[in-house]
Amino acid sequence: MDALMAAESSQTLDRGLRLLRLLADGHRGRTPTELAVELELSRPAVYRLLTTLQKEGFVRRDGDGRVHLGFAVLVLARAVQPLLREGALPTLRRLAEEVGATAHLTVAEGEDGLAVAVVEPSWTDMHVAYREGSRHPLSRGAAGLAILALREGRGGYVATEGQLQAGAHGVAAPVPGLPWLEASVGVVSFTSLDPAVVGPRVATAAEALSRSLA
């Protein structure tokens, strides 16, 4: 009996996690019927999952009855940020020293980008002081535009100039292959950055970070 109950609990947990991943991946709400079809579950099974997840704040329903991720997910995300920062620092340090520019990891929080890890180069006379915790719209700056490119299924790198700070040059690339994370790795400098040279290095760093976090 105990083994049967454990198996049922494990199955329920697996279904709940699959449901949350589905909502996180789509960037849009879904009806319970759509969730049932995509998860290959009965509607009563989906409603049971939604009742529990909504009670705990992990999903919410809008006025049209569509299901979205709930704000309790943000609480878990904030708890992950210190671990994410620690895991990113070695890659960012190598990139900053190699390029001679301030390197950063930016993650998406809704339609904003949040800098969760920043490393300044040790050997340059002048560099951008980019503060951890800085926030900006995804539609402005290389870091945010790279995340938007990730949402559209595009890779490569993005280069901008003066979008977040006058005279600042930025190059960023999305962190690929991690369904649970929307993020980009980038560098920013007051001196000109050659995208053809710096872009591939930033993209390589983003891929290395993805492998280390997978």
Image (cartoon, grey):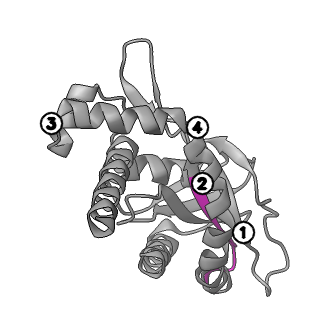
Mark 2 lies on residue: 77
Q: Secondary structure at mark 3?
A: helix
Tell me how far mark 1 sits from mark 2, CA to CA: 18 Å
Q: Quadrant of residue 124?
A: bottom right
Give the left or right position of residue 107, taking residue 10 as reference.
Answer: right
Q: Nearer the viewer, mark 1 or mark 4?
A: 4
Residue at (43, 62) in percent of width and height: 157
Marks 3 and 4, the one that precedes in the sequence: 3
The region drawn magenta spans: 98-107
Mark 1 lies on residue: 118
Residue at (45, 19) in percent of width and height: 62
Question: Tags 1 and 2 in contact by the CB under 8 Å rule?
Answer: no
User: Considering depth in this image, is 188 or 3 the residue closer to the camera?
Assistant: 3
Q: Residues within 10 Å of mark 3 (few under 14, many from 20)?
A: few
Q: Nearer the viewer, mark 1 or mark 2?
A: 2
Residue at (48, 76) in percent of width and height: 213
Mark 3 lies on residue: 37
